[in-house]
Image (cartoon, rainbow, N blue to C red):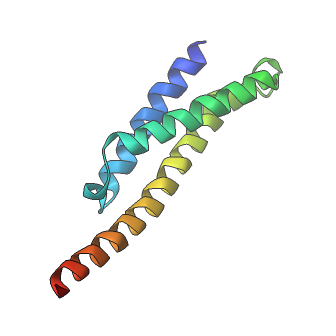
């Protein structure tokens, strides 16, 4: 259970770091990357523990490290995708408003 707490805290922190490093972070909320990162990290931790990888010699690092990496990658993917699409939609809406 301690590994789950560490995973959640670490993924939330990496989600905030991903948000802070994005140049278009004004297009979406601060909690989005942290929430996505925590959700993916928690679900992957549950999957790894259910698969029994947390209790095998040599594989005990998997539920500690891999969910943090997966959560960070998911947060970065969401930020890149959402930042681009929101910027395109905002630019299109502003262009449409200026044409009126």
Q: How many marks?
A: 0
Query: In the image, is residue 94 above or below residue 68?
Result: below
Residue 16 as seen in the image, left or right of residue 80 = left
Image coordinates for residue 89, horizontal then vertical, percent:
35, 70
Determine the residue positioned at 25% across, 81% down.
96
Residue 61 seen in render: no
Residue 56 as seen in the image, left or right of residue 46 = right
Query: In the image, is residue 85 above or below residue 58?
Result: below
Determine the residue positioned at 74% across, 22% down.
49
Image coordinates for residue 63, horizontal then vertical, percent:
68, 28
Determine the residue positioned at 29% across, 70% down.
90
Front-lying residue, 16 or 29: 29
Q: Quadrant of residue 39?
A: top right
Front-lying residue, 8 or 96: 96
Determine the residue positioned at 36% across, 64% down.
86
Query: In the image, is residue 65 above or below residue 32?
Result: above
Image coordinates for residue 67, horizontal then vertical, percent:
62, 35
Residue 69 as seen in the image, left or right of residue 58 = left
> In the orientation shown, which residue stands out farthest toward the bottom?
99
> In the orientation shown, which residue stands out farthest toward the front?
100
Image coordinates for residue 42, horizontal then vertical, percent:
59, 29
The C terminus, quarter of image: bottom left
The N terminus, quarter of image: top right
Residue 9 seen in render: yes
């Amino acid at each position: 259970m301690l590994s789950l707490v560490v995973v959640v805290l670490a993924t939330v922190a990496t989600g905030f770091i991903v948000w802070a490093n994005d140049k278009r972070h004004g297009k979406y909320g601060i909690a989005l990357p942290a929430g996505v990162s925590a959700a993916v990290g928690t679900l992957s931790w549950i999957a790894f523990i259910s698969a029994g990888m947390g209790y095998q010699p040599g594989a005990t690092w998997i539920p500690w490290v891999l969910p943090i990496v997966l959560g960070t990658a998911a947060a970065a993917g969401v930020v890149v995708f959402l930042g681009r699409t929101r910027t395109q939609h905002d630019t299109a809406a502003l262009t449409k408003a200026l044409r009126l």
